[in-house]
Image (cartoon, rainbow, N blue to C red):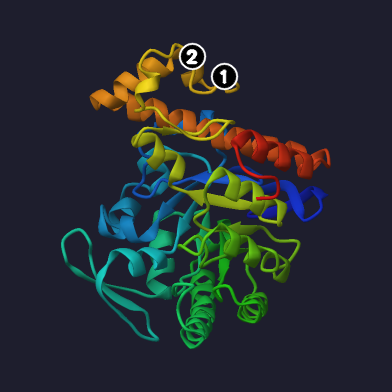
Amino acid sequence: MAPRFDFTISATDGKARTGTIAMRRGTIRTPAFMPVGTAATVKAVKPADVRASGADIILGNTYHLMLRPGAERVARLGGLHAFMGWDRPILTDSGGYQVMSLSDLTTRSEDGVTFRSHLDGSRHTLNPERSIEIQRLLGSDIVMAFDELVPTTSTPEVQAAAMARSMRWAKRSRDAFDGGGAHAEGAAIFGIQQGALDQTLRGDSAAALIDIGFDGYAVGGLAVGEGQAAMFGCLDFAPGQLPADKPRYLMGVGKPDDIVGAVERGIDMFDCVLPTRSGRTGQAFTRTGPINIRNAKFAEDSGPLDPACPCPVCAGWSRAYLHHLVRAGEILGAMLMTEHNLYFYQLLMADLRDAIANRRITAFADGFRRDYGLPKGE
């Protein structure tokens, strides 16, 4: 039988690592990018096409699925994998970020968070125990602890209090997960490091999480408006505060150059809505930088989105056709643009894994930034 959770590092280059996470539903190659399937779908793309792009794992979201269609309903229908037709691993976000960012009239207490749905205004409570219960009902393979996120611009006192509460919630999350019976025997749980941009707070958070014990550790509270330089400044120390023999997951990141820089700093896992959201709005990622296919200059461009890309979209359709589809509001335009972007991200991850394995991560990263139009070392 496949292991519940087995992380193996096969090569390192500086702080960068490549390896695998073996789980019962499949092996995840790291560094890994997880397409976001917030509401039980990676928007505009069929699961088979997500898999064909190279994705080993996707992300679902507790907050959105608890509101619609409801975790209990998904459980009655066989769990999230069967419901959406994805048989590989799924990581579920705990819902903490969405509660803070999408909900009106949010009330926080030591027990948890009471909020009104952004869909219909109905009142709900989410706390560590309920978040873990929802993730168990969904059948998540990697469960995230419930935490409290505050902006990096908050006062030091607010940041310290939120970090401390998140660590208390992490222990409650761990206890609730361990009480999950058969699900806990086949799934994994990650803790989330908090502490904004403060090295001491981050260190205290890491120590608390390590004392509790998790299968993997996320760096939370970044990519929320602080800017790339500040994020990289935090990543210069935060991953090193976490166990070297466990996966390190940077939540909600990001742009291709964010990912390259974070891999150089020791991050193993990523998720972001950017490739799918950008695809639906007409932006394509290419090795020479992003392009807006709506631009008039593409109206008679017979070339592919990215001449260096082997994806089915670049092999089959021109920039001119995609320009027409997107300008006309055709659904196929969003589908094809999104499919290309997913391939771009997965090909980038494959290149990063290869560069680390061959101990040329610095040369690859500098070359990527040069071709992408960024200064060396950005």
Q: Quick check: 202 left or right of 96?
A: right
Q: What element carries label 1?
A: loop
Q: Which mark is residue 3?
A: none
Tell me the kind of residue under disc 1. Pro
Question: Which residue is pictured at 48% across the width and 28% down the height?
Answer: 340
The image shows residue 9 at horizontal and vertical percentages of 77, 51
Between 296 and 65, the one lying in front of the other is 296
Q: Can residue 73 be seen in this view?
A: yes
Q: Is residue 372 depicted above or below 91 in this figure?
A: above
Residue 335 placement: quadrant: top left
Residue 68 placement: quadrant: bottom left
- Asked whether disc 2 touches disc 1, contact meaning CB atoms under 8 Å apart, the reply is yes
Q: Is residue 354 depicted above or below 132 in this figure?
A: above
Tell me the kind of residue under disc 2. Gly
- Say few, some or many: other residues with alpha carbon within 10 Å of mark 2 (under 14 / 14 to 19 / 20 or more): some
The residue carrying mark 1 is: 307
The image shows residue 99 at horizontal and vertical percentages of 34, 68
- Say few, some or many: other residues with alpha carbon within 10 Å of mark 1 (under 14 / 14 to 19 / 20 or more): few
The image shows residue 337 at horizontal and vertical percentages of 41, 29
The residue carrying mark 2 is: 303
Q: Quick check: 195 left or right of 293?
A: right
